[in-house]
Image: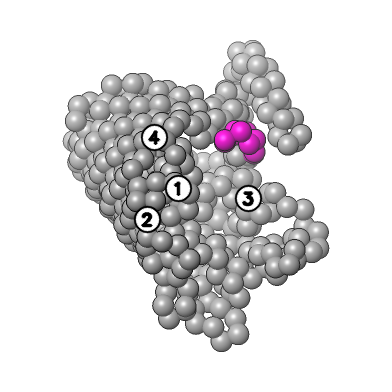
Amino acid sequence: MRLSYIIFSLAAVLTSFGKINAQEENKFQIKPTGRVLIDGAFYSANQSHLFKNGMAIPEARLGAKTSYGNWSSWIDVGIAYGKIGLRNMWIQYDFNKNHMVRIGNFLQPYGYESPTTSNFKSTFEQPLASAIYTPGLHLGAMYTFTNPMFYAAGSFIVESAALTNVMNYPLFNQQGFGLLTRLVWRQKNSGEKYKPILQAGISGGYSTPQQRLVDNEDVHDGFVVAANYPTKVTTLQAIGSTVANSKNLFKFTPEILLAYRKIALESQYFFQQINREAGLHSYVSQSAYATVRAILFGDDYTYDSSIAHLGNPKKNTLELVADYNYAKLSDHKASIFGGRANSFNLTLNYYFNPYITARLNYSYTHAWDRQGYEPVTVNVIQARIMLLF
């Protein structure tokens, strides 16, 4: 906690200093960054005691970005439900416009949704099928190559517990690691006015087991495979399990993006296999989602080639988004019943300007086949106002 306050204060001081420095030399630049999400939700569920209507601030961040020549960096601290923690903290070097390396704590490459934060998620929350496998913020090192037709990223990461636990026996006596990659081909004219945007890619990953405590001792042989319901006023796991006695994990996901003017389709399929010790059957899980986006009024969709993703719609744009998710975390052959889920979401987004976005969402999720849990069906109407700078 104390370290987080120090970093938070340092970011604020650097922000004030950087503005002056940039004006004087026009070389070293620093600018403040931040975001605030304010949500409200109303639930209707067959197990109503699990979901509470109300409002929440699921995330607030403050930080600073710097740049000097080919070097850049970012540090920010987030407050989520009253808890303070470090979020982005990385240093990047751009060899030229095609090659760069980044080291620190940042969003790692794996799938179409991986390079974007909340401000880019058109579906209110990340699709449930993607949230299971997308790695999010991890400590690691990444290399990226990009040109008009190709995007390629590869990353070496360590498990997320490395940021919160001291590596002392018996609570944390090992450190799991992983390898991730994302390879994308896109049509060369993607992003040009009145030209279709076409993109296809595939991502792969490998990981060693991560922390698992047994009788207050780290046996380091587990993987957590899980996802929450697509809402943040109530945070509740929809499906999931911890897979023990594990040796390693392999996963892959193909992705596709099609867009023309005011219509877009985004879709992914996910496959993951966890190989296990002691002759236990390997555990396989799968999921998929499809998202259709339409601009009701406003400028056409744009393309961000630096992250191989659709760009955020421009100001005064009204967008309608529909997505369907299916996830299967139960594997009867492995005798692991993490559950299955169907989820449908309909979201209306209004982009007032580059800094303020409003979202209105209807979400239906049905989760079942999870050991120790009754089936749950929940409908939610929720809204969000987001400030980004």
Per the rendering, the mark at residue 139 is 3
Compute the Cα span from label 1 to label 3: 33 Å
Mark 1 and 2 residues: CB-CB less than 8 Å, in contact? yes
Q: Is residue 77 magenta?
A: yes
Quadrant of the image for the N terminus? top right
Residue to which mark 2 is pinned: 376
Please give left or right for residue 17 compared with residue 47 in the image: right
Compute the Cα span from label 3 to label 2: 35 Å
Label located before the other in sequence (1 or 4): 4
Residue to which mark 4 is pinned: 41
Residue to which mark 1 is pinned: 50
Residue kind at label 2, given as amino acid type: Val
Label located before the other in sequence (3 or 2): 3
Residue in the image at 52% along x and 49% along y: 136
Label located before the other in sequence (3 or 4): 4
Compute the Cα span from label 1 to label 2: 9 Å
